[in-house]
Image (cartoon, grey):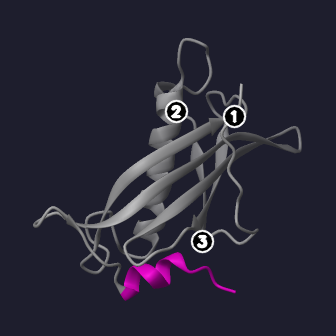
Amino acid sequence: MGRVKLKFPDDNPVFTTTISVRIGDINYGNHVGNDAILSIIQESRVQMLHRYGYNELDIAGCALIMADVMISYRGEAFYGDSLIVKIYVDELTPKSFDLLYHISVVRNGMETDIAHAKTGMACFDYKTRKIINMNDALKTLLTPAQ
């Protein structure tokens, strides 16, 4: 079976956060469920925007809508784990961009990959229900410091 693979652009994420695995994230297999990974990447994205005083509905007048998502499961995470989520930017266009999420956990001094994910994000005007051009505030947020 061919697996979906993500190539992370560099070692310069635009944002890094730590998210604790909650009991509600655990499924019948006693590990983080696939639906919880989607929730964890959304939480990471919201935290990134919040750091700059924004949210998904208002980034200095620009809103976001998710166009697609891809998740590649790499390992198990369990209740109480602290997940390290690094967010990278790729495929920046005038109206859209991809966010890549590298999710890992450190156990016994070793980092283990839990999941790699990508969300295709588009700039959106919820009043007109149309894709719009990205504004300068969002461009600046998405450009990692060199």
Snapshot quadrant of residue 127:
bottom left
Q: Is mark 2 on a helix, strand or loop?
A: loop
Q: Which of marks 3 and 1 is in front?
A: 1
User: Farthest left residue?
Assistant: 127
Badge number at residue 37: none
Kind of residue indicated by mark 1: Arg
Q: Which of marks 3 and 1 is nearer the N terminus?
A: 1
Q: Residue at left 16%, top 63%? A: 126
Instruction: Please name the residue that numbered disc 2 is placed on.
Output: 22
Q: Which of marks 1 and 2 is nearer the N terminus?
A: 1
Q: How far apart are marks 1 and 2 (CA)?
A: 28 Å
Q: Which of 3 and 49 is in front in this view?
A: 3
Q: Which of 79 and 112 is in front in this view?
A: 112
Report the span colored magenta: 136-146
Q: Is residue 51 left or right of residue 82?
A: left
Q: What element carries label 1?
A: loop
Badge number at residue 3: 1
Quadrant of the snapshot with the N terminus:
top right
Q: How far apart are marks 3 and 2 (CA)?
A: 25 Å
Kind of residue indicated by mark 2: Arg
What's the magenta bit mostly, secondary-structure-wise? helix
Instruction: Please name the residue that numbered disc 3 is placed on.
Output: 14
Q: Distance between the residues labelled 3 and 1?
A: 26 Å
Kind of residue indicated by mark 3: Val
Q: Earlier in the sequence, mark 3 or mark 2?
A: 3
Snapshot quadrant of residue 29:
top right
